[in-house]
Amino acid sequence: MSQDTYDNPLISRYATREMAVLFGQRTRIGAWRRLWLWLAEAEQELGLDISDEQIAEMREHLDDIDFEAAAKYERELRHDVMAHVHALGDVAPKARPIIHLGATSCYVTDNGDLMVLRDALDLIARRLAAVILALADFAEKHRDLPCLGYTHFQPAQPTTVGKRATLWAYDLVLDLEEVETRRERLKARSAKGTTGTQASFLQLFDGDHEKVRTLERRIAQKMGFDGVYAVTGQTYPRKVDVMILDALSGVAQSCHKAATDIRLLAHRKEMEEPFEESQIGSSAMPYKRNPMRCERMCGLARFVMSLASSGAATAATQWMERTLDDSANRRLTLAQAFLAADATLNIYLNVARGLVVYPAVIARSLQEELPFMATESILMEAVRQGGDRQELHEAIRQHSHAAAATVKRRGLANDLIDRLKADARFAKVNIDSLLDADKFIGRAPQQVDAFIANVVGPIRQRHSDAGAQASDLHV
């Protein structure tokens, strides 16, 4: 790798090799050559004068791509598809006359992209499933560990550490459903012709419409698709790209949200991402344990979210049957959205499998706020013991404000319980019995159990290999 020119960090630092290979040129041009082979096979099956020898010659050279020769042709021809037509023709000279017969460039570029997008969505689905399962394991382990809940990032009714993890997991479950839907609804462009009218193929088959329709279906089947887009211009509908980018944006949003939560909890010293023995948190402050994995997740996720708008703008500006301003943009946005989403999920998996919980700190944080949360139970019990509800409510209000002032202005511990115990109006109430945190978490543990059984269970069955997904990070 040259150190003199820009290097894409998505490749060198973040994305997995599996995703990087999917969007590599060898995969892309390999798909083109297969598409040329499948076109020739289907045309031969439907009666065109294409010999078995020509087919065999093309099949022999699906993967021995001479990229230098293709680059030389492209400098001369200024056309990437024709450059590779010539490069394949050089090694398959008998097949040269029938390579790309009747096709337009989008036959290979769009169909090839659809094949890559299909495989990339499959990979993202596996990554999502792996993180969901890791979070489910974490949630199950901490299903009944009470912790302080937050709304508006202010103390609220308690929940459990496991229940909070199900919130992170469920966001990803919804993302998985969307990704799988996008994958399921992908179709082939197949053999549509220059402006989508199939005129060139109709001419090849002497006006036989049924043969043209059959050609289209057979190529789609060879590509591994169940159907073709009903109508197209020169390209498959760019709305498809928008829908895929939106799905990836949704994945990124979920990752960003969870990573931010973990960063906030790390600040409170309640939970943190894994930290390796020799890892350095800061070059200046040796004591630091910065949440760098979650910070990286947020940074990459923001990038993915930003790309969705580019896909929308591209789809909106495809004049008539198509304009070529989509080409350069799509080369960047589609590949990089998948690479960045893949990287974000890989980091998430690493974090989810190594999350560190500090129960003592969590308990202390909860106990500092629990007195305020217990006031309703204390009020109800005092009323049951014969007290006046309105008088008791006012007493609790005054004691609560005084205790809050003690905490905020003097930096002292919350003394609300001591104040209530010293108030004769609450003398008949066993206040200590009402301060059990387990009494304030509602059905959180049971909700965790139900979520794992009913929601995660089917995902575990569909993605039985998800537990083997890698989580090693480059840096």
Image: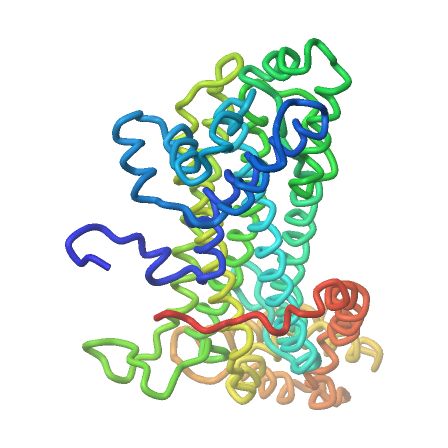
Q: Residue at x 45, y 55 (%)?
A: 21
Q: Residue at x 50, y 79 (%)?
A: 270
Q: Is residue 177 above or below residue 100?
A: below
Q: Is residue 406 visible?
A: no
Q: Which percent across, then down, holds residue 117? A: 56, 44
Q: Position of residue 10 (x, y in %)?
A: 37, 55
For residue 128, above or below residue 319: below
Seen at 56% across and 87% down, the residue is 359
Position of the C terminus by quadrant: bottom left
Q: 351 or 183, which lies in front?
A: 183
**Foreground: 156 or 299?**
299
User: Residue 209 is drawn in which quadrant?
Assistant: top right
Q: Give the percent coordinates (x, y) of residue 132.
A: 64, 66
Q: In the picture, residue 134 is in which quadrant?
A: bottom right
Please name the residue shown 52% across and 58% down the image: 255
Quadrant showing the N terminus: bottom left
Classify residue 236 as left or right of residue 230. left
Tell which of 183 and 133 is nearer to you. Answer: 183
